[in-house]
Image (cartoon, rainbow, N blue to C red):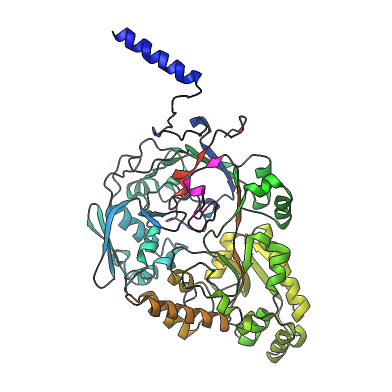
Amino acid sequence: MRLRILSLLAAAALALAGAGLAAAETNAWGVTLPPDAAPASQQFVRLMSFEGTTADFAVSVYKRVGNSYSSIMATPFFRINKNFELEPVGVTSYENSRDGKTWTFHMDPAVKWSDGNPLTADDIVFTFQYDADPKHAWDFAWFWSDLVNWDDAVAGKVPVTSIGVKKINTYTVQFTTTVPSPYFLYKALYVRPLSKAAFQKSGEYYNNDPATAVSSSPWILTEWTKGKRMVFGPNLKYTGKLRPYLEHIIIDFGPQEAEFNAYQNNEIDMCDAFSPANIATVAADPQLSKEYHPGFLDFRTFYLGFDGFHKPFSDLKVRQAFAKAVDRDTIISKIVGRQGMAAYSFLMPGFPDSNSQALKGEFPNIYDVKTAQKLLADAGYPGGKGFPALELALRNETPVNQAIGEAIASMLKDNLGINVQVSNKDQKVFMTSLNAHQLPFYMVSYGMDYLDPSNMLGIWVSGGRHAWVNARFDQLVKDATSLSGDKARRDSMFKQAEKILVDDVGGIFIYHQTPGDAYKPYLKGDQLEPDKAGVTAWHWPGLEDVGALNTSIYVSRDVPSDRHM
């Protein structure tokens, strides 16, 4: 009887094969691949980025490989999907206190580290105390300034054990802010723990070496060949609920200028760095045009900033002159093209409380060369005479943004008689100088970290990265940030604050990025389908652990047979 059953099963299998229906394949985690998926051996994605010094957000934000590509080995509290909705990942539930200041999170006890240790509240508290430690000098410390005692701990005035991050029990952790924090869930997207045990055993860079790497996500570091590439493979000891299709994520190290050629040569599967010439090539090629997908990414705005604490930019007339001498329309039409729209405010259209169209007609936003020249003359620099030598610093920018920098320098020379040299600086050097208020004039960008105006406008509050102070702006943003129960009033306060930012020329807003990512047509997945706004794109934050793309994406059967890791 047993032999007869086996024969029947074999016959059925042959019949299915004859009908072109192969048995469903599973990957390393035992996940059944979609019907149109390529074999598990092809479930990898290849990227290109600059080489950083760490893979962990808590060690450094701006020194990570590619700034984000390598942040894939932690299970965060939440992740965000293509519709900018939060999805719990590392927590099972959470609640907020009546006064709005205390958030309690209940962690998922099923999640463990690859070394067998559980992921607990101790890891969360340890990570936050490490980031608050002035000896660490974390480059993103400002982000958690609303936590109790955070700033004082960062300044070395109080011990890190006093910050508003507290273990309640093994799997429960509590965050307490100095003011009501209606926005905090979106900030909690960045609760990305380090392993306390691995850190204490192997040091803060334990995730730089496959031999000591410890992960709580589906992936773990399997290779980091300096100067060449980084590879993440399956963490077969993963115990959480995420079940990806991709088995490997490969990051080749290379300059941004090489990315488009590598994409055209089928050496990588996604490209997000384009020169103006590259964009023209895309527009002229029907296939590349299909593979190019503009999106809103992280609502990023590129802007000019100043050292407003010292001459010449401490003079409002100088800042106004610069603002009125920059022709945004020419920059968009000649350089940016489909990758952006003119910016007249910091908040991009579509972002909560954006008021871009209303601010378009504000005095500093109107391109007017004659008025710009008069303002500069009134400030004591007629025709640019006596104006100090000026450098426009860029932050390791793409060819497109380098071209924008050169265009702005040319406009300032032609319209104001001011000589400006453009310098595309190393990212670390730039950020160190920016945070120390040592850049007289620069172009930089900022994109949202969480979907609330308090995030975007909050970086302009005095004491942060910008050498600009306006007491009324500070008060409006601080009050609106903690205001609960009156959304209309809160929205109005943020709009008033942004108008002050524009009128007082805290910065000159050049363009909102609508970046095109090119990716191969064999990359599929729900997160690559149109979002609720109808936008089809490689949605922010890409393959990072705080995004939903990494478990949605897969490689279809359309992939070339000669593609290899």
In the image, is residue 325 above or below residue 163? below
**Residue 280 on image: x %, y %:** 73, 54
| Quarter the N terminus occupies | top left
| Quarter the C terminus occupies | top right
In the displayed structure image, the side of residue 413 where residue 240 appears, left or right: left
The answer to whether any part of residue 215 appears in the image is yes
Magenta highlight on residue 535: yes
Magenta highlight on residue 509: no
In the image, is residue 67 above or below residue 163? above
In the displayed structure image, the side of residue 469 where residue 360 appears, left or right: right
Q: Nearer the viewer, residue 428 or 528?
A: 528
**Residue 438 on image: x %, y %:** 58, 73
Q: Which residues are magenta?
A: 523-545
Q: Nearer the viewer, residue 55 or 353?
A: 353
Tell me where residue 190 sits by quadrant. Answer: bottom left
**Residue 493 on image: x %, y %:** 43, 80
**Residue 388 on image: x %, y %:** 70, 80
Q: Residue at x 31, y 73 (%)?
A: 180
In the image, is residue 269 above or below residue 443? above
In the image, is residue 213 above or below residue 367? above
Q: Residue at x 51, y 35 (%)?
A: 43
In the displayed structure image, the side of residue 514 where residue 107 appears, left or right: left
